[in-house]
Amino acid sequence: MIPVFSLGIEVLLLGILFQNMNQLFSITLYGGVVSFFIGFSLAIIEVNNMVYLQKTITTEFLGRVMSILTIANRALLPIGSLIYTFLFDSITFGSYIFMGNGVLCIIFGFLVFPRVVKSVKKDHLFIKKHN
């Protein structure tokens, strides 16, 4: 869950950066650094999720589950592009969108964290019992 919280903080920081800086070089430099850490956090989340899925899903269902996840991921990309295109067109200061997304990501992390911990503990007990 640490990468989820750090992702929220990084996206919030990117919005604050866009809000407060007006020099192109500063935005490019600091925005690039923050974007690197956003990508790093997303990679950690993705690797953890894939390892967790591969450990918990039986081999006979793994291909089907991965296919469904890939299809769902690819299907949601155009929908997200449409929504964010509309948001960036209608809101004058696009930095507020980044800040709002960062705050929502942090709130999501706090709301989901107890359920994730409970679920992981339950899965570990299940795996130990059936090994």
Image (spheres, rainbow, N blue to C red):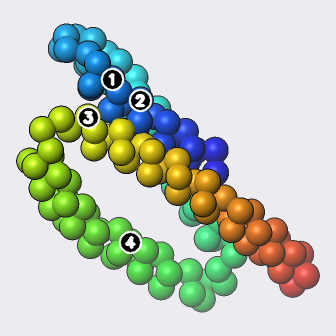
Q: Quadrant of residue 20?
A: top left
Q: Position of residue 113 (x, y in %)?
A: 66, 58
Is residue 2 visible to the viewer in this orientation of the structure?
A: yes
Callout 3: few (<14), some (14-19), or many (20+) C-alpha neighbours within 10 Å? many
* 98 horizontally vs 4: left or right: left
Q: Which mark is residue 95?
A: 3
Look at the numbered discs 1 and 4 and tell me whether their residues touch, using CB distance below 8 Å: no
Question: Mark 1 is on which residue type?
Answer: Leu
* Mark 2 vs mark 1, CA separation in Å: 6 Å
Name the residue beneath numbered marker 1.
Answer: 17
Question: Mark 4 is on which residue type?
Answer: Thr
Look at the numbered discs 2 and 1 and tell me whether their residues touch, using CB distance below 8 Å: yes
* Mark 1 vs mark 4, CA separation in Å: 33 Å
In the picture shown, does residue 119 fall above or below 60?
above
Q: Secondary structure at mark 3?
A: helix
User: Quick one: which residue is furthest to the bottom in this view?
Assistant: 60
Image point (27%, 25%), residue name: 19
Look at the numbered discs 4 and 2 and tell me whether their residues touch, using CB distance below 8 Å: no
Q: Secondary structure at mark 4?
A: helix
| First along the sequence among labels 3 and 1 | 1
Look at the numbered discs 3 and 1 and tell me whether their residues touch, using CB distance below 8 Å: yes
Q: Secondary structure at mark 2?
A: helix
Image point (52%, 47%), residue name: 106
| First along the sequence among labels 3 and 4 | 4
Which residue is at the front of the view, 102 or 40? 102
| First along the sequence among labels 2 and 3 | 2
Is residue 51 visible to the viewer in this orientation of the structure?
A: no
Name the residue beneath numbered marker 4.
Answer: 70
Q: Position of residue 58 (x, y in %)?
A: 66, 84
